[in-house]
Amino acid sequence: MRTRKGAARAQAKKRLFRRAKGYVGGRRKLLRTVKETLIRSGVYAYRDRRRRRRDFRRLWIIRLSAACEQHGLRYSQFIHGLKKANIELDRKQLSELAIQDPGGFQAVVEQVKKALAA
């Protein structure tokens, strides 16, 4: 007697349909469409996990640029001054500092200005 794939196939389909929960129309109900949609969604998810890092870095740079402008510095000068002053805070920490603790950011800017003047 030949083997059939009944239970295994049903399980595999069930697994796919479970992942497609919340999709609209045939994207949730039709096997072929579900497969295509899941592949595409996986590609988008993979791409956007990398994209998120870029987007956040851009956001931090924009915030820092605005904060530096208020203290009479350009962003590029500020980053150069940080390296000269051996301050090892990353852009994420600096942008949070600029928002949450303007006094602390002011202190960092003063150190940067001293390093640039020297």
Image (spheres, rainbow, N blue to C red):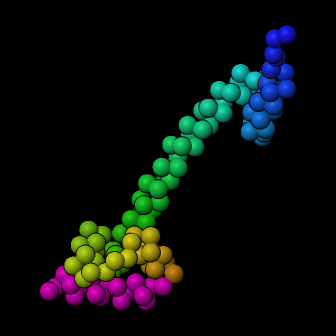
Q: Which residue is the extreme one toward the left?
A: 118
Q: Is residue 62 left or right of residue 9?
A: left
For the point 37% across and 87% down, the residue is 106
Q: Residue at 81%, 16% (x, y): give it.
A: 3
Classify residue 107 by image quadrant.
Answer: bottom left
| Residue 85 on image: x %, y % | 25, 82
Q: What is the quadrant of residue 84 in the picture?
A: bottom left
Residue 63 in the image: above or below residue 87: above
Residue 115 in magenta stretch: yes
Q: Position of residue 118 (x, y in %)?
A: 14, 86
Residue at far front of view: 1
Q: Nearer the viewer, residue 26 or 117?
A: 26
Q: Position of residue 70 (x, y in %)?
A: 36, 78
Instruction: Please indicate whether residue 13 sits to the left or right of residue 107 in the image.
Output: right
Q: Residue at x 62, y 37 (%)?
A: 41
Q: Is 59 above or below relative to 50?
A: below
Task: Tell me which secondary structure the magenta stretch mostly adopts.
Answer: helix
In the rendered image, residue 43, in percent from the top left (x then y), is placed at 55, 37
Q: Is residue 112 magenta?
A: yes
Residue found farthest to the top: 1
Side of 22 where 59 appears, left or right: left
Q: Is residue 63 visible?
A: no
Looking at the image, which residue is at 66% across and 30% down? Answer: 37
In this rendered view, identify the residue nearer to me: 16 or 106: 16
Which residues, given as a range, are shown in magenta? 101-118
